[in-house]
Image (spheres, rainbow, N blue to C red):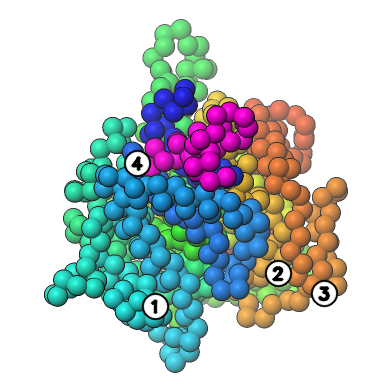
Amino acid sequence: DAVLGIPSFRFVPLTYQLFARIDGASAADCMGSQGSNGEDIFQAALRKIVKKICIDHPYHGIIQLIALANGNNVGEEGAMRNSSEFLDNVGNSKVIAAEGILKDLRKEKSYVSSLVDSYQTLIASYIELAMFPTKNMLKSNPKKTKGFPLSAAYGTGNGDRSKGGIPSLDRCFAKTKSGRGQSPLSCPACILTKPPEIRPGADYGEGKEDPIGAERISNFRPTFDVTETGIHRPKIIICEGTKGGKYKQLVKGEDDIRQDAIMEQVFTTVNALLRQRGASKNVHDSETKHDELIETRSLSNAASRQLRIATYNIVPLSPASGVLEWVNDTAPFGDYLSDKKKDPGAHSKYYPGEWGSLLCRKLLSEEKKNKRAIFDKICKHFSPCFRYFFIEKFSHDIQAWHAAKMLYTRSCAVNSIVGHVLGIGDRHTHNILIHQKTGEVVHIDFGIVFEQGKSLPTPETVPFRLTRDIVDGMGPTGVEGAFTTAAEATTKVLRENSSSLLTILSAVVADPLYKWSVSPVKARQRQVAARGDEEEDQMEGTITYGNGSNLIKANDGEDLQVENENEGASRALKKIERKLQGYEDGIAAGEIKSVEGQVQLLINAARDADNLCVLFPGWAPWI
């Protein structure tokens, strides 16, 4: 009763973790439980909380519940790479429990009942599009990537609900002249990638009007595009809102994006900590000592220095599909610098006589013994040139140029420190986007986290990406000045709020729907895919990855787990806690570093040529 007395909006930020723990007997059995079994009591209370979230905050809760109910939907023959793992973790009991709660919600007399139906129809249509294979469509014209009709991605009835099939997205809410068949859903859903702000008073318009600060779905453009690259070629669609907004979305299939969604959740928490630290510190305390005052002023301006991580919305719809918010006006860091088909990159443009990235990759890949020598030679023939990005985009106004460069430098610092603490890896040049209008960096694709990069076939040896081109964009002072100051401020905030951060992370890493350990085959797949080669190396015989007590073996594609989820969660949290205390591996391991000492140690490790030269060539350490 005490838990149920807590306002429901307090639970909304943790819907992923709460909903993942739904399990056990039927809802009716749990609700009738009188306390003979502790697990039954827990499940009864949890179901009431989940139901209350969905009734009070339907635009935030119903989607997660439907996604859990879709737990067995992993595509044809387990198309998703982690399908068997996910099914083992979810189990039928969770799916049945989620379906039971949805059934109860349909009995509600409020607009929530209609909203459940709307979301289920909409999500089914999204999943159908996500799982549609594009190979046959692209065979006739491989170069065509735009303007495919949405109806072509739907089987029975070509997306026409009246013909017995799943409606295509553009027909979910479409009106018909006859008023029969495909009538619009009675209670339109909100834009999936632009949910409303959490309202403590649960005032979301009662289904009759748009929630404050948000839009409901009006329709979809009748065509979709596909990405130019990618293992599964995600689809790009345009969702139209009731207020006239146009929202570009990326629909992914045959991939589990839940981990990415959870990392965005953690980033949101970090941003809140940065804002609170900047707002709460009092720099005018007359009793503060001089040196403490300098530090306090530096840190209290965290908010004004725009210390934050750029986030975007990710909505898992099933274990093998989901929809992501398209980050407008951004482009991959590597696309600007490197040649792309017939379009020359900045390096070829400003240094036409130097080596290209393909040659650099080839040379580093072929050299097996003296990596450092060939890496130094590559650097002599490949000059950094990212400073020209700011000249090209912001030369019209010196103030705009300075603001963009500073925002770029500070966002690099925040992402670097937070990424290191969370052990985020795989930061190759296409997993970092640069905003064309602000200069801010946006990181994407968080398939390697919690130090999993150290278990890759070619282990990652740097704490974050701070290569020569990254530093070149910061201007003449490089990492000295704004970058170091912002990195120290971020580190200080994370240390001071380590208890809060670890509390959130403990719920995240102990999520029963996911195992955080990376398997050897999955690790191998990521680096082969990142390399971009058409020819994949074969895993011959038995290959050993890892070190010490964590040595594991993989034979002919076996997907083995290094450890169970409890051990992985405990180890990940312990590693994060040590970093927040000032401990680092390598030089002077075991010694607590000051904030300044820790930041400088990380900067040195990230720029060390001995570390960079042994990285996977697809990571492009020379850029």
Residue 122, image x, y percentages: 35, 62
Image point 29% across, 67% down: which residue? 172
Give the Cα separation between the discs numbered 4 and 2.
57 Å
Amino acid on which disc 2 is placed: Leu
Amino acid on which disc 3 is placed: Glu
**Helix, strand or loop for disc 2:** helix
Image point 59% across, 67% down: which residue? 80
Q: Where is residue 109, by image quadrant?
A: top left
Amino acid on which disc 4 is placed: Ile
**Residue carrying label 4:** 55
Q: Which residues are magenta?
A: 25-54
Which of the two discs, 4 and 1, labels the residue nearer the N terminus? Answer: 4
439, 556: nearer the viewer = 556
Residue 366, image x, y percentages: 75, 74
Is residue 492 magenta-colored?
no
Give the Cα separation between the discs numbered 4 and 1.
32 Å
**Helix, strand or loop for disc 1:** loop
Q: Mark 1, residues whose alpha carbon is within 10 Å: few (<14), some, or many (≥20)?
A: many
Give the Cα separation between the discs numbered 1 and 3.
40 Å
Amino acid on which disc 1 is placed: Tyr
**Residue carrying label 3:** 540
Which of the two discs, 4 and 2, labels the residue nearer the N terminus? Answer: 4
**Residue carrying label 1:** 154
**Residue 382 visible, this orientation:** no
Image position of 480 (left or right of 569) = left
Which of the two discs, 2 and 3, labels the residue nearer the N terminus? Answer: 2
Which of the two discs, 3 and 4, labels the residue nearer the N terminus? Answer: 4
**Residue 171 visible, this orientation:** yes
**Helix, strand or loop for disc 3:** loop
